[in-house]
Image: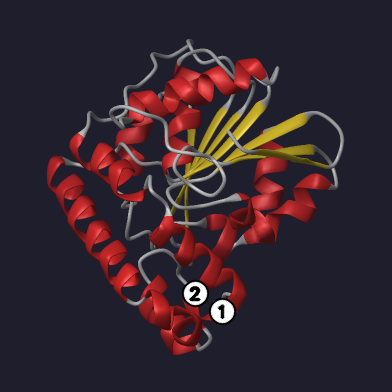
Amino acid sequence: MHTVRTGSGRPLVLVPGIGAGIGTWRFVLDGLAAERQVVRVVLHGFGPTPLFPGEVTVARYADELEAHLRDQGLEHADLVGSSLGARLVVEMARRGLGRSTVALDPGGFWTAAQKQVFGATLTASVGLVRGLRPALPALLATPVGRTALLAQLSARPWSLPADFALAEVRGLADGPGTLPAIRALAGGPDQEGAPAGTLPGPMLIVWGRQDRVTLPSGAARAQERFPDATVEVWSSCGHFPHWDQPERTVRTVLAATA
């Protein structure tokens, strides 16, 4: 699993979502690395990390992440995840790994109907950007194009830098793990919870109120399944708080993992 370490101090592991590489944390990296050693990993099937053989399931992603954390001596590190990565760090905590956990808009807390809509809409979005691949640089160079292609992911897609938007959309379009991971989330089991008193440390779950991927109604189900967790819903924020509110994300992560 591709891993990049930046900064010094107590390790803080960042686990991204579908299609994302180490660059997805661009807006929060400096703030976090000023105080911690930031360990950015890339999940299997994206960027330089090859897709593992066999069936793609969320449980397999979790097993691979757990093995990597143990191999790197990070099983007691603070864990931060986004989207699929948020679900994985929640699962790590349920398994007893990690110190403090911060989950940014995790998957796995949909209703059955919402899960079907998630699978259908995100699969369609991937098909669209794959079909538009030759035109992506020109489309994403404009605020209108960024809004059209990234409105599902960001509350302020027009404000994202063009080069950043292009890298993120290409990662989603080109990753061999993209569609298998979407199918695993849409067709697999929901995230299991952890009874009170069983987590290894504090857990914070953050949801963007404008999240159109993992809908904010999932926050209540997350709280029910993880009664020891603190759950926050942020206004003016979409699926990626580290895109839409990077300064608040840095402050929140550092405080939650202090």
- Locate residue 128 relative to residue 170 in the image: left or right: left
Residue 149 in picture, x, y percent from top left: 38, 75
- Locate residue 148 relative to residue 154 in the image: left or right: left
Residue that label 2 marks:
156
Q: Where on the picture, by quarter, is residue 14? A: top right
Kind of residue at badge 2: Arg
- Locate residue 22 relative to residue 8 in the image: left or right: left
Q: Residue furthest left?
A: 113
Residue that label 1 marks:
159
Residue 168 in picture, x, y percent from top left: 51, 63
What crowding class fits label 2: few (fewer than 14 Cα within 10 Å), some (14-19), or many (20 or more)? Answer: some
Mark 1 and 2 residues: CB-CB less than 8 Å, in contact? yes
| Residue drawn at point x = 38 percent, y = 13 percent | 195
| Residue drawn at point x = 39 percent, y = 74 percent | 133
Quarter in which the C terminus is drawn: top right
Residue 246 in picture, x, y percent from top left: 64, 60
In this picture, is 197 found above or below 154?
above
| Residue drawn at point x = 50 percent, y = 89 percent | 142
Q: Secondary structure at mark 2?
A: loop
